[in-house]
Image (tube, helix red, strand yellow):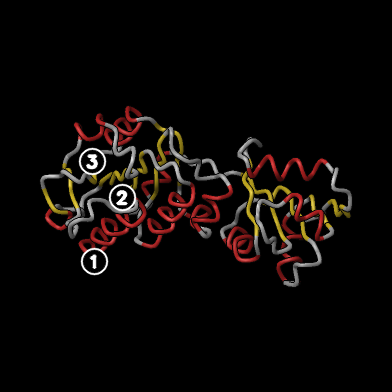
């Protein structure tokens, strides 16, 4: 791909503002990825690179060459300038702006006859949300819905927390409780909600059917509309005095139980 290869030496260059705006979620339609592994994951997943910035600190020549071939805007920076546009405390010499994926409903259902879509309700910590996305992909979930009011899965901290899963796992962001219920009805998915006061253990419920699995943050919990509409409310047995789990850990317990049942 022919590209606009430029040397970026000034800390006042507008490119710095573009990268910083993307990190803050203020640049519409794009997301930021940084670091050798994460950028390589993005390329491997076929993500479209809008702009790439590299500095001498990047010693992976193969990755540098891939980026030059993948984008029309390739910026060569000093280490100091890249540090200015980076959201990391210790930049690795490479940062890219990627086209944000747009997912239709059907993408979240995958190719299986029994989709398993995770719903993250009220998860405001981007690191926890990223870990949840990573766990969902590892357990074979077909997609994820991140609800309105929670962290944006396409912001830099959530992207890093997902360790690349956000590039592969179909994610739909911004639905409210009504939207989630409509999604379930439209695609004939049962609604299973993780709830500390649930009437059944997570191992006592059939998780092989097409379903939405809803998990909520410890503080906010699951919206009452989803609790009321749940096909099943399940709890994970905990040893006292512990009364709750981190949302990504709880999601992992439930998702791998679903995976076990589906083998």
Q: CA distance from mark 2 to mark 1?
A: 14 Å
In the rendered image, which residue does mark 2 sit on? 115
Q: Residue at x 18, y 50 (%)?
A: 235
On residue 263, which mark appears?
A: 1
Helix, strand or loop at mark 2: loop
Q: In the image, is 55 to the left or to the right of 86?
A: right
Q: CA distance from mark 2 to mark 3?
A: 12 Å
Q: CA distance from mark 3 to mark 1?
A: 21 Å
In the rendered image, which residue does mark 3 sit on? 191
Provide residue 70's location: percent of width, then percent of height: 72, 57
Q: Residue at x 35, y 59 (%)?
A: 140
Give the mark nearer the N terminus: 2 vs 1: 2
Q: In the image, is 61 to the left or to the right of 217?
A: right
Viewer-side label of 2, 3: 3
Q: Residue at x 34, y 61 (%)?
A: 139
Give the mark nearer the N terminus: 3 vs 1: 3
Provide residue 237's location: percent of width, then percent of height: 17, 57
The quadrant where residue 219 appears:
top left
Q: Quadrant of the N terminus?
A: bottom right
């Amino acid at each position: 791909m022919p590209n606009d290869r430029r040397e970026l030496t000034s800390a006042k260059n507008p490119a710095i503002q573009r990268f910083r705006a993307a990190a803050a979620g203020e640049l519409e339609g794009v997301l930021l990825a940084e670091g050798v592994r994460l950028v390589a994951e993005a390329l491997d997943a076929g993500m479209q690179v809008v702009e790439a910035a590299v500095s001498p600190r990047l010693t992976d020549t193969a990755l540098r060459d891939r980026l030059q071939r993948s984008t029309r805007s390739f910026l060569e920076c000093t280490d100091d300038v890249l540090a200015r546009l980076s959201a990391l405390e210790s930049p690795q010499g490479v940062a890219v702006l990627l086209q944000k994926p747009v997912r239709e409903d059907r993408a979240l259902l995958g190719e299986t006859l029994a989709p398993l879509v995770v719903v993250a309700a009220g998860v405001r910590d981007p690191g926890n949300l990223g870990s949840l996305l990573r766990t969902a992909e590892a357990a074979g979930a077909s997609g994820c819905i991140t609800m309105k009011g929670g962290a944006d899965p396409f912001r830099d901290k959530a992207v890093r927390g997902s360790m690349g899963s956000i590039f592969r796992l179909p994610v739909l962001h911004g639905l409210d409780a009504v939207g989630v219920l409509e999604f379930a009805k439209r695609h004939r998915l049962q609604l299973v909600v993780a709830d500390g006061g649930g009437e059944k253990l997570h191992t006592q419920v059939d998780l092989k059917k097409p379903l939405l699995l809803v998990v909520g943050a410890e503080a906010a919990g699951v919206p009452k509309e989803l609790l009321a509409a749940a096909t099943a409310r399940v709890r994970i047995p905990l040893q006292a005095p512990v009364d709750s789990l981190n949302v990504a850990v709880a999601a992992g317990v439930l998702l791998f139980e679903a995976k076990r049942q589906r083998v």
